[in-house]
Image (cartoon, grey):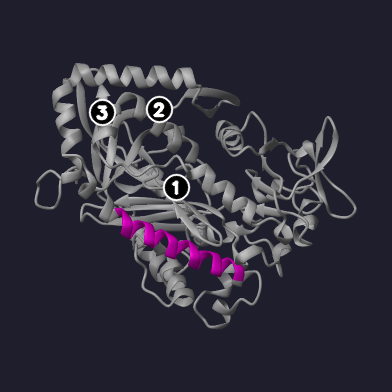
């Protein structure tokens, strides 16, 4: 499905102006805009890190200048569905660490929780502000050839990529200023204001003017550009584990040249197991000793809360429609992709008998790693996949190979061709919710590829949510 066209094959009204501009520019003019965008990215220092053979390699952010367009009316439904989903998932997480009513009522299996690698018993009995554990989320969406958006997975631990949403927009505004003057494109620039508002709202005891810090693993982390970008945009402090100390009164303080300064809210970009060497991995050199104690005792707030990853599991994902019905009393607005759970013998048999027609995924990997796409795998890979499923059924799910939508993409100096895309909107959940209009569109650059991750050769696009009724015609 080409997203520029509706089911009737006609160009969508929201795509008319862009289509006309691309026609007027021609391939040479378009390539000039692409070169200008790439030069802007170099000048702005927008990078991401690839780990290769033990080395950290900084690369310029891969960006395609042709934006992706989504109709505003269609986006309103997607936005409502994401807010619904995250409200339900947060209620689910809060329940698992407290009363576990969803298990008592037989909606969610106790054995699935018992086998979860992301369930943290250390978080039992904690009640974060507003009952929210996953404050910052990134749900991956795909559009099937039926024209509908589906949720592919939820990222609730330390989701990354929002800085590139903002930078993609900044670059595109410089490259296509004329279109921004004539079209009603929903802004994304206010994300960091909304993020700062959310973080300050969860400060312990409603403290006024709380000190917010972004906790990073350090400069060698693949998302360090984003950590520093967000801290700077919010006016927050960017800190590493060694910069923080927890006192005997559980107060978390930041080391400064003027002495210790209390920290009220930590936006952590470190995985659970590295957060506090006194509680989790004792060999962690990037965590803060005593941080979990301070959080449990209400002396500091952490976003996302430790333990939120219990719902960030591709097996738990299969239960999300039931989770929404249980906590919200509503039908899901955005559907899941049909999912077979290998932990159940009948579903496992279906997967093993149909590997060639399925996408098989490990439960807790990220970045596209470990995924086997059946119709593109050789026989040896499929045999290895089958053996892995048999050895650890709980760790595997499978889904049909979707016909992902495509958008026009520059593939060479003389060609624009359709390439498959997904979408990661970012959802902020607190006393109120906020969803980025659009989000991070990732594009699979090799022809026919479905792998969109930048670490595996994917690129990105600016995503425009366009309100057609407000366009300047």
Q: State the image quarter where residue 301 is shown.
A: bottom right
Which of the numbered marks, if any, corresponds to residue 201?
none
Which of the numbered marks, if any, corresponds to residue 178?
3
Q: Earlier in the sequence, mark 3 or mark 1?
A: 3
Q: Magenta stretch containing residue 323, yes or no?
A: no
- Alpha carbon separation for disc pair 3 and 1: 53 Å
Q: Residue 178 at x, y = what percent?
A: 26, 28
Q: Residue 429 at x, y = what percent?
A: 53, 58
Of badges 1 and 2, nearer the viewer stands: 2
Q: Which residue is mark 2?
A: 62
Taking the spot 34% from the left edge, 57% from the top edge, the residue there is 78
Taking the spot 50% from the left edge, 61% from the top edge, the residue there is 393
Mark 2 and mark 1 in contact (Cβ < 8 Å)? no
Q: Earlier in the sequence, mark 3 or mark 2?
A: 2
Which of the numbered marks, if any, corresponds to residue 384?
1
Local packing at callout 1 (Cα closer than 10 Å; few below 14, some 14-19, many 20+) is few
Of badges 3 and 1, nearer the viewer stands: 3
On screen, residue 293 above or below 3: below
Regarding residue 158, the answer to whether it shows in the image is no
Q: Magenta stretch containing residue 84, yes or no?
A: yes
Say what secondary structure mark 2 lies in: loop
Q: Earlier in the sequence, mark 1 or mark 2?
A: 2
- Alpha carbon separation for disc pair 3 and 2: 23 Å
Please provide the residue range marked out in magenta.
Answer: 75-94
- The residue closer to the viewer here, 434 or 374, is 434
């Amino acid at each position: 499905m080409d997203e520029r066209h509706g089911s009737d094959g006609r160009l969508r009204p929201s795509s008319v102006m862009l289509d006309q501009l691309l026609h007027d520019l021609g391939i040479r003019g378009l390539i000039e805009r692409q070169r200008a965008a790439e030069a802007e990215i170099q000048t702005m220092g927008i990078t991401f890190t690839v780990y290769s053979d033990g080395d950290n390699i900084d690369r310029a952010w891969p960006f395609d200048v042709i934006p992706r367009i989504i109709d505003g009316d269609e986006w309103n439904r997607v936005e409502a569905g994401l807010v619904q989903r995250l409200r339900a998932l947060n209620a689910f997480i809060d329940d698992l660490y407290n009363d576990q009513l969803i298990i008592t009522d037989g909606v969610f299996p106790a054995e699935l929780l018992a086998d979860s690698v992301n369930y943290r018993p250390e978080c039992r009995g904690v009640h974060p502000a507003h009952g929210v554990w996953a404050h910052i989320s990134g749900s991956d969406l795909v559009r099937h050839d039926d024209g509908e958006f589906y949720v592919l997975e939820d990222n609730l631990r330390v989701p990354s990529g929002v800085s590139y949403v903002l930078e993609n927009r900044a670059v595109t505004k410089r490259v296509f200023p004329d279109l921004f003057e004539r079209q009603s494109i929903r802004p994304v620039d206010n994300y960091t204001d909304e993020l700062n508002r959310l973080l300050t709202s969860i400060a312990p005891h409603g403290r006024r003017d709380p000190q917010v810090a972004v906790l990073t693993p350090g400069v060698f982390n693949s998302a360090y550009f984003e950590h520093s970008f967000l801290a700077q945009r919010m006016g927050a402090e960017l800190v590493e584990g060694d910069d923080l100390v927890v006192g005997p009164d559980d107060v978390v303080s930041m080391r400064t040249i003027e002495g210790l300064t209390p920290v009220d809210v930590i936006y952590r970009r470190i995985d659970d197991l590295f957060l506090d060497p006194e509680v989790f991995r004792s060999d962690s050199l990037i965590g803060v000793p005593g941080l979990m104690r301070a959080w449990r005792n209400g002396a500091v707030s952490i976003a996302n809360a430790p333990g939120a990853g219990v719902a960030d599991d591709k097996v738990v994902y299969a239960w999300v429609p039931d989770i929404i019905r249980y906590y919200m009393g509503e039908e899901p607005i955005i559907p899941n992709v049909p999912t077979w759970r290998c932990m159940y013998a009948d579903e496992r048999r279906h997967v093993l008998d149909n590997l060639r027609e399925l996408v098989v995924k490990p439960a807790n990997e990220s970045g596209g790693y470990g995924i086997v796409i059946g119709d593109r795998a050789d026989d040896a890979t499929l045999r290895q996949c089958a053996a892995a499923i048999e050895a650890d059924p709980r760790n595997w799910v499978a889904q049909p190979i979707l016909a992902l939508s495509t958008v026009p993409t520059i593939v060479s100096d003389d060609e624009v061709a359709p390439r498959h895309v997904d979408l990661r909107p970012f959802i902020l959940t607190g006393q109120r919710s906020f969803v980025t209009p659009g989000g991070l569109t990732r594009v699979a650059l090799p022809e026919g590829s479905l792998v969109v991750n930048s670490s595996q050769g994917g690129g990105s696009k600016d995503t425009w949510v366009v309100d057609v009724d407000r366009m300047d015609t």
